[in-house]
Amino acid sequence: MEWTSAQLRSLVELPRRGTITAVAQALGYTPGGVSQQIAALEKATGMELLRRVGRRVELTDAGVTLAAHAERILATEAEAVEAMERARSEIAGVLQVGLFATAAAEILPLALQQVHRRHPGLSVHSQDMDVDEVFDAVAAGAVDLALGLDYPDVPIPRNPALRLRRLYRERFSLAVPTGTMPGADAVSLAATRDLGWILPSAESYYGRAVRTACRRAGVEPDVRHVVTDTAATLALVEAGIGVSTVTDLMLRLRSSRFDVVPLEETIERHIVVVVRASAEFRPTVMALVGILGELADHARAEAGPRGLV
């Protein structure tokens, strides 16, 4: 029988995700592409591998059997890739990296410069992703590693198949239209009771983290605009539409004119690099993670005690 790693990975993800669409989102494919991969597997095996149950799909007995073996095949493949990389005299190969907008703008360019200088044989390919999806993308093997966000108030569920390394810890401040809080050295979230908020969806980790902090301070944020894009959020604050939380890295995405006031309460986010446990010792992965760690150390040293920690 002939099959590809992509086909086996799609099959393995089906019972975890439940729908073709969810598998496609996790792996960075289109739903049609996932369906074609499963169809190709069924053709190769000559057996039906999945069946529809309402809006969801589930594996047949044959599908369950093949998925169990596929897990081992993919793990063995990962071990082979690591062994081949270690057999080389130089760090070389291709790495697929998932990342979110802030990381793409502020972190990846510096890392790629260092990769090009130190490891010319290493080619890094990146793809912009929804920040809440990067953990699943790494776990599913859609990317080799990713830059993601973790919030202490609403932490990402820990997956034993993943390894997380914290690069930066950022503290949020409050972005307010110019003149809204003149002369304020710091402000409590309770003071935003009568202000309109601009926040991501309550289903997002970021949106949940800010709402959790507000409720802990005794106030329910009046979210009038649900916005995911950071640059759009900053533009709305600048236009006097409402308030939002910001970090230093977020502020660097767009030159804006509004006031930034420190918060009395602590709301943090951690920028992390995520790798599969089975791939954390691959030379190429270790090289890029090492460079990211060095850049984070340098940024902390430059920022001083009040900056990134």
Image (tube, grey):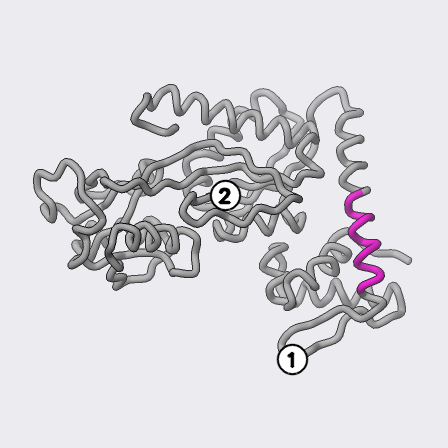
Q: Which mark is residue 2?
A: none
* Residue 31 coordinates in the image, percent (x, y): 63, 66
Give me the residue at 77% from left, 36% from top. Answer: 81
* Residue 225 coordinates in the image, percent (x, y): 28, 62
Give me the residue at 56% from left, 21% from top. Answer: 117
Name the image quarter holding the C terminus: top left
Q: Which amino acid does label 1 sit on?
A: Gly
- Residue lying farthest to the bottom in this orientation: 54
Q: How crowded is mark 2: few (under 14 residues within 10 Å), some or many (20 or more)?
A: many
**Is 73 left, or right, of 106 in this rendering?**
right
Q: Is residue 77 above or below residue 299?
A: below
Rendered image quadrant of residue 21: bottom right
Q: How crowded is mark 1: few (under 14 residues within 10 Å), some or many (20 or more)?
A: few
* Residue 207 coordinates in the image, percent (x, y): 37, 55
Main SS, magenta residues: helix
The residue that label 1 is drawn on is 54
**Is 296 left, or right, of 82 in this rendering?**
left
**Is 59 left, or right, of 236 in this rendering?**
right
Residue 264 appearing in the image: yes
Q: Is residue 71 magenta?
A: yes
Residue 125 appearing in the image: no
Rendered image quadrant of residue 269: top left
Give me the residue at 8% from left, 38% from top. Answer: 183
Q: Which amino acid does label 2 sit on?
A: Gly
**Is 125 left, or right, of 40 in this rendering?**
left
Give me the residue at 79% from left, 58% from top. Answer: 67
Name the image quarter holding the N terminus: bottom right
Q: Is residue 208 magenta?
A: no
Span of residues in magenta: 64-75
Q: Which mark is residue 148?
A: 2
* Residue 65 coordinates in the image, percent (x, y): 84, 61
* 2 or 1: tag closer to the N-terminus: 1
